[in-house]
Image: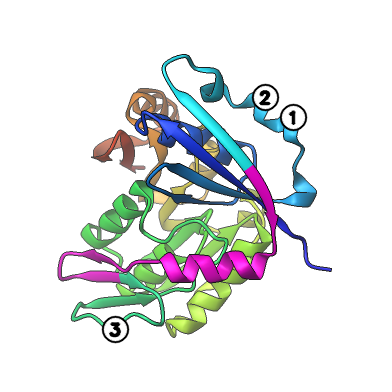
Amino acid sequence: MADNYLEYSFTVRPKQPATDILLAELNELGFESFLETPEGLLAYIRKSKWEDSGLDEVSVLSNPKFQIDYKYSEIESQNWNQEWESSFEPILLGHHCAVRAPFHPKPDVKYDIVITPKMSFGTGHHETTHMMLQFVLKNQMQGKSVLDMGCGTGVLAILASMRGASKVDAVDIDHWSFLNAQENVKLNHQEQIRVREGDVDLLEGVKYDVILANINRNTLLRDISHYVAHLNLGGILLLSGFYKEDLPSISEKCAKYELSFQENLENNDWVSAKYVF
């Protein structure tokens, strides 16, 4: 029997920055996908992985600066996927890149990425994915070996491959994301991308010229040492999934492993940063 999902519907006042904080905290608890609404946020998690008491760990719910109400319901994953598809809008990054669903018309751009987002994070709508796409566009990928860590839909790996990367690995610990990334790789005719299910333990004996990691603050701080161990000298580490106020701690940890800060992008208090080894 398929594992049904719980849909939590949050009403948030004022909407920002509370919605972004809420999303980050829910992500830490294992919520797999999110959809912003005019009222706040929809968040999805497998029923088998969740207990209501888990929300006790979400500090923003008790923050007196915000009023956050919620309700939840159990839904079948296929119905959720249909809703995702009906609400998914194409993303355009200038005249260079588009991220769209199969039912959207083909745009006049150099890199046309078609994805079926389903339950996976990384459609390009969230600020972090959008900035990481910008970084992939502005940095050299031709002939590079690339790792997309925490790949979600696989959209970053797909763009790196389209831009001429010689080798691309896409890794995610979530089974649904693993399957979805495989599907999107085939959909975009980028079968040379190797999609793997797991974590940093899969990287043993492999090094890359570029590592992309759009995850979250705590995971990044924990795994930066692992990324460095698998980064070629002169290689690039592109990180996202954290807030502006977290940048100093991320940069401090990177400097500890001889990673030099180069630049960062900002979007609604979210940050993506570039480091060179």
Q: Are marks 1 and 2 in contact (CB under 8 Å)?
A: yes
In the structure shown, which secondary structural element does the residue marked by tag 3 occupy?
loop
Note whether 267 is above or below 96 in the view shown: above
In this rendering, does residue 205 appear at all?
no
User: What whole-number distance in Å separates the C-alpha atoms at marks 1 and 2?
Assistant: 6 Å
Image location (x, y in percent) of residue 268: 28, 37
Q: Residues within 10 Å of mark 2 (few under 14, many from 20)?
A: few
Instruction: Return the residue at label 1.
Output: 53
Q: Residue 15, located in which quarter of the rendered image? A: top left
Instruction: Return the residue at label 3.
Output: 105
| Residue stretch in magenta | 72-98
Nearer-the-camera pick, 86 or 91: 86
Say what amino acid the circle numbered 2 marks.
Asp
User: What whole-number distance in Å separates the C-alpha atoms at marks 3 and 1?
Assistant: 44 Å
Q: Is residue 7 left or right of residue 237?
A: right
In the structure shown, which secondary structural element does the residue marked by tag 2 occupy?
helix
Say what amino acid the circle numbered 1 marks.
Ser
Instruction: Return the residue at label 2.
Output: 56
**Precedes in sequence: disc 2 or disc 3:** 2
- Which residue lies at the image location 51% right of the left edge and 24% below the top edge? 60
Image location (x, y in percent) of residue 105: 29, 83
Nearer-the-camera pick, 211 or 106: 106
Is 206 covered by the magenta stretch?
A: no
Q: Residue 18, located in which quarter of the rendered image? A: top left
